[in-house]
Image (cartoon, coloured by chain):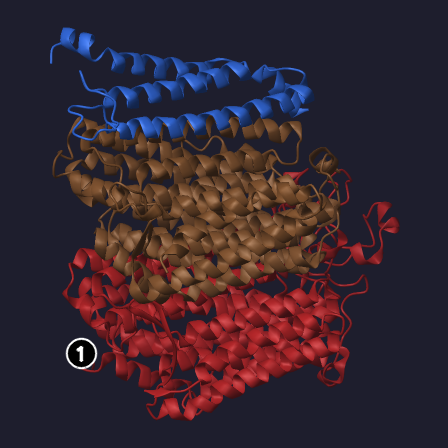
Chain colours: A blue, B brown, C red
């Protein structure tokens, strides 16, 4: 597979890598706790994108058996979609817990800056 | 009969909703519900253990969908031991929690949820399902760490959340790669496909192993992925530390072992020796680094947290060596460490509650004020060093023998030396407890209020139950030192299946 | 081989007694009663097996599988009996002595002391009766743990540091080296069970691995036997109460090291294989070096217990050395030295302890004329010291005699080893004679400065009692107890004649005690509890003179201490005069016969 071909057909994977790296960088580099969580979400979304991209079949249809019966022909793999749905639920609940913690931290320290909080907490 | 497996997971998760609903009417209903639920869990775990003991491995298909399409729950020697550990530790820590708190009903929601998550991780036979349970475990743990509602614990919990979620997500990436390579998520199915339809040396498979290993390494607090562990252990309430220290990273390491042996199998290691070498090397470095970091900690809970890093280094090294003896050693040490660390944190919690002693210095001469608790602490700490007869020694013996069998001389040397490394921080603790007069140190009284000031009931009362739990763990640590034949009988079929 | 619960009972009896001791912590008399009863019971159990063992029976308690392929076995074979019989017998004596010593000094933490002592003896029995390498390792580690509280007993900086050092060394020897060696032997031979003449599988393995395993085990056990360069913990451990130094650091603990080496040579590798591997000679040479070097160090020690400690280091190397000579005589000499040295060294330590309790004198340089005050104690000391030097009719002679014959018989490098033994005998006199001489033949106001080697040839005269002239006015303000003590301030012009070399060095003189840079370096800031070290010396009027008759009427020291001293010195003489009748030699002949059966080294 040439580089150009990959760019045209596999761009979803490129986006996956880019989003993953961006999210990871935000989680590490941003001192702002909320932005860290945004980074975390981006990181996870990248993975969702990856799963959905793997399931894509050119010209494939929805993996639902028609009511009247019969074969559907080529269809997208349903399993990754299910996985992603579950993972999204997990991700949402994580975000909820994270934000709840951040609210608690903000009321305690009056700041969302990691450095500031570390300094205050040390006392 | 195999439904016990499903019940093991479902009972605590369903029961975790009860404290919320019944809490509307009764005030302190959480603890009784937890006791009832976890007693059921212990009974179920005993049933599973019995069945594995007599019949060997058995599975349960969730919802009646057969594997590889449905999700399987699997009980074999390894998962049975972890399940028993989870059930016993969860129930015993309740004996500590009754007086020590936190007492809110919502605490017990997270407590039971965590138990369910842990059971799920240990029993599932599906890699994606494993991710979900890992995240349930994670969610409950984050909530528990912050359950004293102090700012510091919230910061620790958030740090843990970010690192832990990143780890779980990396694991999910690894699962995704494996799925792309093979098109299945069932563990047994995956292991059949890997090496058959796709070569072990395929970059996709290697990358998937790397992601999975790093992701689970985070959960198991393997050096250098351990950075969440000191804060999470040190800042959380004592009850929670005792609970999570023995179980959460334990199931992380369990999941790693499960993935290595059941999914990737030792043939993968043979095909890609670099993966094995890197894993063992990192783990071995972790043994040393964890101990050195532990020695440097003035805070007891932090010290014990770093000690976990060191011990998990040993466990993961054993799993990485991939021979039968080392595997048995790794599992024994995994279970043993669960008991030891829980007991140690319970004992440390008792001393903190009674005297506000949270630093090694503040432990001066407590050996004569709380003889039972400190004796338990001493026995557990010595077991951690690997003084026989104790569970700590058993693990070390098998791992060392495994390392020698594998001709891994550096690993063997480090494991032998780890006696001294562990002794470094254990001796410091014991010496202070028994041989440093109270007046010789200047003790800052005390972190007690800063740490526990916002508990709903800042009680400093030590109940008999708290001490009994510590002593029971100490006795178990010594008693299990004689259980090697039992461990072997249970683990040999497992080892035989995958090696 | 007979299945019998007695080996297990011998181990457990004092362990169970520990709980009684702990429970009776408010009632010292009951507590000590429990100790005595346990000691007697333990000795009774061990002694009851002796006739059977002499007839070739081996009693075994098998508790079951401990680890796959290895059972947890305790069995009383002749070698184990030798050690167990010795240690349990001496525990009785030491228990009485402990009571006298601990109460005489009004020591704190006595419950912990007696409890740890009982556990230590349990572990020692376990070592003696262990049926395989793993079992011995278990008890070896337990012994390290159980004796740690005894070393750190004083709860001050010095004893804590000694305790730390003790744990580090013994754990390095046990948890690292012995464990590694055990794992290696298990890996090589598939068995770790002690077998007379050696474990079968070991003979077939690659000699390189065999050598590695041998060195790991020999050095690992050698750490507790004070083998140089890993002997440092032993002199440090002398901060422990004297009964501990006596029973544990001259008998039980250090001998468990020597005993471990004996097991390795006789029952793991077997004398023949050990000889073929050629590595035992290296260990023997190390022992020869140790016994000479330790003797030289001992000459320079002024602190009596330190001198005894180095003497122990030196004497234990006799045993290790003898085990490396292999022949009939060498092995007998080595094994006989275990009880011989035990009786003698126990006597010496008991004497040092009695002197400490009665006069608070620890330094030899302050003991001039002390024979007047404590005639019986010092008399016993002189007898035991003579035995140490290998003078006939004392215990040390017999064992050394066998060792020398063994050395000459083997020839070659063993001749040098035998030479080292002879030189060491002379050195023994060099370091023990000054103590006896100063005690009986010198006066407190005119004696040679000690240690002799630190001063110009011909000696320098010193006085330990306070001088009536030349003293500064401060003399009047000093309480009588402190008279004759070194001046720690370093600022006054008052000379202190009991502390040699110091005056030249000026300010920090006392810290640079010529004999020892560890012991006194932080004494100034101790609580009065361990001030004993620089109290002492004669009272201003000189030592009171006691006749032997008065001494026996309890004027010298209590019978709790005098009795044990006399008992152990009697033992030392009996082993020297009638070695066969006290069973030790007979037992040892059985051991050696078993070990050498069917090998070529049998003469």
User: Considering depth in this image, is C114 or B277 the residue closer to the camera?
Assistant: B277
User: Considering depth in this image, is B189 or A39 the residue closer to the camera?
Assistant: B189
Q: Is residue C382 shown left or right of residue C549?
A: left
Q: Quadrant of the N terminus of chain C?
A: bottom left
Residue B494, compared with residue B144, is above or below; it is: below
Residue C88 percent location from the top left of the image: 52, 80
> Circle 1 is placed at which residue position?
C599
Residue B299, compared with residue B487, is above or below; it is: above
Q: Is residue B359 shown left or right of residue B327?
A: right
Residue B15 percent location from the top left of the image: 55, 47
Residue under the image location 81 percent in, 48 percent down: C470
Chain of the residue under label 1 = C
Residue A116 percent location from the top left of the image: 62, 15
Number of numbered discs present?
A: 1
Q: Quadrant of the C terminus of chain C?
A: bottom left
User: Considering depth in this image, is B200 or C466 the residue closer to the camera?
Assistant: B200
- Give residue B316's quadrant in the image: top left
- Give residue C13's quadrant in the image: bottom right
- Give residue B474's quadrant in the image: bottom right
Residue under the image location 26 percent in, 45 percent down: B67
Residue under the image location 36 percent in, 38 percent down: B129
Residue B78 percent location from the top left of the image: 34, 53
Residue C345, compared with residue C50, is above or below; it is: above
Query: What is the secondary structure assignment of the residue under circle 1?
Result: loop
Task: Evaluate whether residue B110 shows in this view.
Answer: yes
Task: Evaluate whether residue B425 shows in this view.
Answer: no
Q: Is residue A29 shown left or right of residue C53?
A: right
User: Considering depth in this image, is C554 or A122 the residue closer to the camera?
Assistant: A122
Q: Is residue A66 shown left or right of residue C233?
A: left
**Mark 1 nearby-residue class (10 Å; few <14, some 14–19, many ≥20):** few
């Amino acid at each position: 597979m040439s580089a150009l071909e990959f760019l045209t057909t596999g761009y979803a994977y490129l986006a996956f890598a880019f989003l993953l790296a961006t999210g990871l960088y935000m989680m590490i580099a941003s001192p702002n706790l909320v932005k860290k969580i945004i980074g975390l979400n981006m990181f996870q979304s990248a993975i969702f994108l990856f799963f959905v991209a793997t399931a894509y079949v050119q010209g494939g249809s929805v993996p639902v058996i028609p009511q009247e019966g019969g074969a559907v022909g080529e269809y997208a793999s349903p399993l990754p979609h299910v996985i992603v749905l579950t993972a999204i639920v997990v991700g949402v609940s994580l975000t909820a817990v994270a934000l709840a913690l951040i609210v608690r931290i903000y009321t305690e320290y009056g700041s969302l800056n990691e450095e500031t909080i570390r300094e205050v907490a040390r006392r | 009969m195999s439904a016990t497996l499903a019940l093991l997971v479902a009972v605590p998760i369903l029961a975790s909703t009860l404290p919320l609903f019944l809490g509307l009417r009764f005030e302190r209903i959480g603890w009784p519900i937890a006791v009832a639920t976890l007693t059921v869990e212990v009974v179920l775990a005993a049933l599973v253990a019995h069945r594995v003991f007599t019949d060997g491995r058995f599975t349960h298909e969730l919802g009646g969908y057969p594997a590889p399409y449905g999700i399987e729950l699997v009980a074999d020697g390894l998962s049975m031991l972890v399940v028993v550990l989870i059930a016993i530790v969860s129930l015993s820590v309740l004996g500590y929690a009754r007086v020590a708190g936190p007492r809110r009903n919502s605490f017990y929601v997270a407590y039971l949820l965590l138990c369910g998550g842990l059971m799920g991780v240990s029993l599932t036979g599906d890699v994606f399902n494993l991710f979900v349970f890992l995240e349930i475990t994670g969610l409950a743990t984050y909530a528990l760490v912050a359950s004293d509602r102090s700012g510091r614990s919230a910061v620790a919990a958030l740090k843990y959340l970010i690192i832990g979620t990143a780890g779980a997500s990396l694991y999910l990436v690894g699962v995704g790669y494996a799925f792309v390579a093979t098109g299945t998520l069932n563990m047994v199915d995956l292991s059949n496909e890997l090496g058959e339809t796709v070569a072990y040396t395929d970059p996709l498979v290697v990358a998937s192993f790397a992601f999975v290993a790093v992701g689970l390494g985070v959960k198991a607090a393997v050096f250098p992925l351990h950075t969440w562990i000191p804060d999470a252990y040190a800042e959380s309430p004592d009850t929670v530390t005792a609970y999570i220290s023995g179980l959460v990273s334990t199931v992380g390491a369990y999941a790693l072992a499960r993935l290595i042996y059941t999914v990737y199998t030792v043939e993968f290691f043979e095909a890609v020796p670099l993966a094995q070498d890197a894993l063992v090397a990192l783990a071995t470095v972790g043994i040393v680094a964890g101990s050195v970091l532990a020695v440097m900690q003035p805070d007891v809970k932090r010290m014990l947290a770093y000690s976990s890093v060191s011990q998990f280094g040993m466990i993961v090294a054993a799993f990485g060596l991939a021979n039968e003896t080392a595997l048995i050693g790794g599992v024994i040490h995994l279970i043993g460490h669960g008991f030891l660390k829980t007991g140690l944190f319970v004992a440390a919690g008792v001393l903190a509650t009674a005297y506000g002693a949270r630093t090694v210095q503040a432990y001066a001469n407590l050996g004569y004020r709380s003889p039972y608790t400190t004796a338990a602490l001493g026995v557990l700490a010595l077991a951690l060093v690997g003084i026989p007869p104790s569970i700590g020694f058993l693990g070390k013996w098998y791992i060392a023998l495994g390392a020698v069998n594998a001709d891994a001389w550096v690993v063997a040397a480090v494991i032998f030396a780890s006696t001294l490394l562990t002794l470094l921080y254990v001796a410091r603790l014991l010496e202070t407890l028994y041989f440093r007069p109270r007046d010789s140190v200047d003790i800052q009284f005390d972190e007690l209020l800063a740490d526990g000031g916002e508990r709903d009931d800042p009680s400093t009362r030590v109940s008999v139950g708290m001490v009994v739990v510590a002593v029971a763990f100490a006795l178990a640590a010594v008693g299990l030192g004689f259980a090697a034949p039992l461990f072997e009988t249970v683990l040999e079929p497992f080892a035989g299946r995958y090696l | 081989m007979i299945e019998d619960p007695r080996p297990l009972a011998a181990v457990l009896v004092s362990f169970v007694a520990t709980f009684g001791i702990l429970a009776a912590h408010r009632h010292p008399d009951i507590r000590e009663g429990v100790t005595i009863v346990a000691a007697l019971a333990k000795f009774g159990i061990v002694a009851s097996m002796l006739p059977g063992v002499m007839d070739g029976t081996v009693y075994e308690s098998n508790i079951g599988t401990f680890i796959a392929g290895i059972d947890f076995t305790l069995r009383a074979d002749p070698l184990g009996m030798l050690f167990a019989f010795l240690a349990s017998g001496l525990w009785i004596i030491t228990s009485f002595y402990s009571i006298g010593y601990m109460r005489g000094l009004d020591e704190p933490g006595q419950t912990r002391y007696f409890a740890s002592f009982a556990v230590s003896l349990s572990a020692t029995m376990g070592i003696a009766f262990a049926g395989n390498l793993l079992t011995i390792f278990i008890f070896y580690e337990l012994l390290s743990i159980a004796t740690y509280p005894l070393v750190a007993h004083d709860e001050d900086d010095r004893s804590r540091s000694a305790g730390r050092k003790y744990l580090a060394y013994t754990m390095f020897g046990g948890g690292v080296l012995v464990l590694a060696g055990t794992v290696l032997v298990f890996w090589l031979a598939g068995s770790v069970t002690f077998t007379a003449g050696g474990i079968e599988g070991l003979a077939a393995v690659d000699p390189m691995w065999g050598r590695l395993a041998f060195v790991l085990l020999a050095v690992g056990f050698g750490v507790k036997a004070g083998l140089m360069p890993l002997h440092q913990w032993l002199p440090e451990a002398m901060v422990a109460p004297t009964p501990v130094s006596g029973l544990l650091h001259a008998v039980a603990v250090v001998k468990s090291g020597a005993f471990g080496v004996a097991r390795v040579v006789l029952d793991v590798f077997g004398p023949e294989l050990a000889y073929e591997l050629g590595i035992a000679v290296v260990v023997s040479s190390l022992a020869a070096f140790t016994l000479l070097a330790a003797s030289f160090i001992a000459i320079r020690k002024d602190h009596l217990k330190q001198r005894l400690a180095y003497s122990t280091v030196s004497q234990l190397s006799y045993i290790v050395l003898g085990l490396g000579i292999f022949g009939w005589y060498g092995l007998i000499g080595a094994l006989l030295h275990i009880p011989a040295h035990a009786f003698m060294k126990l006597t010496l330590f008991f004497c040092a302890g009695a002197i400490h309790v009665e006069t608070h004198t620890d330094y030899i340089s302050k003991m001039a004329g002390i024979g007047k005050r404590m005639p019986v104690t010092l008399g016993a000391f002189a007898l035991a010291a003579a035995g140490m030097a290998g003078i006939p009719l004392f215990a040390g002679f017999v064992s050394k005699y066998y060792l020398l014959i063994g050395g000459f018989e083997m020839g070659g490098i063993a001749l040098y080893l035998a030479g080292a033994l002879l030189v060491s005998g002379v050195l023994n006199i060099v370091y023990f004679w000054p103590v006896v001489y100063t005690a009986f033949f010198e006066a407190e106001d005119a004696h040679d400065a000690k240690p002799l080697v630190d001063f110009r040839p011909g000696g320098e005269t010193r006085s330990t009692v306070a001088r009536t002239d030349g003293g500064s006015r401060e003399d009047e303000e000093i309480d009588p107890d402190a008279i004759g003590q070194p001046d720690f301030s370093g600022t006054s012009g008052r000379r202190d004649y009991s502390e040699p070399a110091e005056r030249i060095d000026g300010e920090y003189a006392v810290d640079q005690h010529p004999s020892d840079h560890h012991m006194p370096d932080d004494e100034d800031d101790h609580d009065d509890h361990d001030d004993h070290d620089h109290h002492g010396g004669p009272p201003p009027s000189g030592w009171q003179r006691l006749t032997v008759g008065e001494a026996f009427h309890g004027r010298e020291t209590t019978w709790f201490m005098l009795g044990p001293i006399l008992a152990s010195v009697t033992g030392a003489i009996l082993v020297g005069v009638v070695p066969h009748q006290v069973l030790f030699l007979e037992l040892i002949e059985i051991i050696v016969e078993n070990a050498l059966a069917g090998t070529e080294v049998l003469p």
